Amino acid sequence: VIDVRKLYTEHGYFTYDPGYGSTGSTQSSITYIDGDEGILTHRGYRIEDLAANSSFIEVCYLLLEGELPNKKQLAQFEKNITYHTMLHEQIARFFSGFRRDAHPMAVMVAVVGALSAFYHDSTDIHDPHQRMIATHRLIAKVPTIAAMAYKYSTGQPFIYPQNDLSYAENFLRMTFAVPAEEYKINPVVAKAMDLIFILHADHEQNASTSTVRIAGSSGANPFACIAAGIACLWGPAHGGANEAVLKMLAEIGDKSKVKDYIKRVKNKEDNTRLMGFGHRVYKNYDPRAAVIRTACHDVLDALGKRGEPLLDLAMELERVALEDEYFISHKLFPNVDFYSGIILQAIGFPTSMFTVLFAVARTVGWVAQWKEMIEDPTQRIGRPRQLYTGYGERPYLPIDKRK
Ligand code: ACO
């Protein structure tokens, strides 16, 4: 390991690494990725094992505390989280300030950032107990805010949390239940939702997590930092990818047009990319995609949606791209968001909610990384350098002498 800090302080050198593709910005013991081998572990546990055996809330405990919980620890953790699922009533009123057609990610950025105005007590980042409460509050309240953002966009009344349900079930109920109508949780859907949350929980120093760390490195409060992460996640090259997948499918329109679309992508016409394909780190396959692919096919079968034209088109696109020499030679495989978009569409979420669901899941990764950073004695403010390409020094011209 080269200590780049010394290169700079002792020799005046710094590295130029656009996009930080080969810059390690921190030490971390939370998540490990081997992009060549397609390995993802959290605290040493393979994502495939966690997906097959754990609940999302158990994975939250693992990411935050470093170990899988025993029964007593899990029960206490669930109690701690459910204690905080409600929002202050004044936050509920906050929603009415938004236009009905506001993108729910815009609402998420604003409302999560505004939590710091309501929960002053847990903005003291130097108090370990308050740090813990802040992490619990964020994990607990983000699904409530997300469901409210959805309800607000549909004009339906908010549904308050029901704390005897699991994290995923509670979220589905707050989103889809309508007052005075019985809401039955479909176990296949709840399991798929929980799986999507697990698969998106953390992914080491991706753009939004790095954003959270950079924001937090200045000592900003955790609610502001997570709002910064949500803002970064919104982009189509990151969390917006699953929404972009569905937009792309709508643009292709019909199964018969898949080959033409692939040709456009290969010819790089208008910089068109196959959304939901490729990954900065995984250059062989995304292990999360392998897990979610099976779940995706199960959900389509269980909900009787396999024949639906849009979903059928997605399956055709997957088939054609996986056999195409361009995608094989560029090591471009479907990533987790290709399938999560299809599942979420089948469950009934509008595309505008897709990135919101990613934010709900990733909140635990962000808070775990934020907490790790705050507790690291070597932590310094994040301050990248730049390669200046502008003018050298020039004489100042008075306005009447300028061309
Ligand atoms: N479709 C077509 N070609 C692609 C794609 C794609 N989805 N992704 C990369 N390429 C091509 C590029 O055109 C380039 O080709 P060239 O070498 O012939 O010029 C080559 O593959 C390398 O591309 P880069 O942009 O350097 O790859 P990078 O690692 O920076 O990009 C990224 C990773 C942003 C994810 C990219 O693959 C992409 O845009 N994918 C689509 C968006 C997407 O699905 N994002 C989700 C990421 S996963 C997540 O956030 C959970």
Image (cartoon, helix red, strand yellow):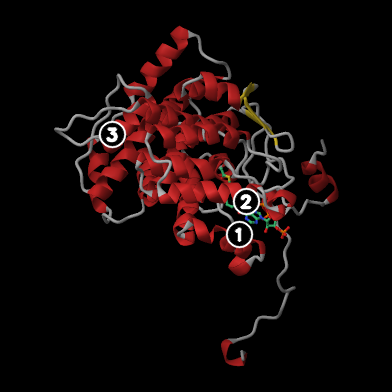
Residue found 58% across the figure and 19% down from its top = 66
Residue 115, percent across and down?
A: 36, 39
The kind of residue on which mark 2 rests is Ala
Gap in Å between the C-alphas at discs 2 and 1? 7 Å
Residue 1 in the image: x percent, y percent? 82, 35
Instruction: Answer whether labels 3 and 2 touch (C-beta < 8 Å).
Output: no
The residue drawn where x is 59% and y is 58% is 273
Label 2, ligand 1: CB separation under 8 Å: no
Element type where label 3 sits in the image: helix
Q: Earlier in the sequence, mark 1 or mark 3?
A: 3
| Residue identifier under label 3 | 174
Q: Which residue is mark 2?
A: 321
Task: Say few, some or many: other residues with alpha carbon within 10 Å of mark 1 (under 14 / 14 to 19 / 20 or more).
Answer: many
* Image coordinates for residue 178, horizontal then vertical, percent: 20, 37
Q: CA distance from mark 3 to mark 2?
A: 37 Å
Q: Position of residue 5 (x, y in %)?
A: 77, 42
Task: Tell me the amino acid under the disc marked 3.
Answer: Met
Q: Above or below — where is 285 with respect to 264?
A: above
Earlier-in-chain disc, 3 versus 2: 3
Tell whether label 1 touches label 2 (CB within 8 Å). Answer: yes
How many numbered discs sit on the rendered protein? 3
Quarter-of-image position of residue 91: top left
Q: How far separated are the C-alphas under marks 1 and 3?
A: 39 Å
Please, is residue 101 above or below residue 362 in the view? Answer: below
Could you tell me which secondary element the residue under label 1 belongs to? helix
Which residue occupies the foreground of this view, 89 or 19?
19
Badge 2 or badge 1: first in the primary sequence: 1
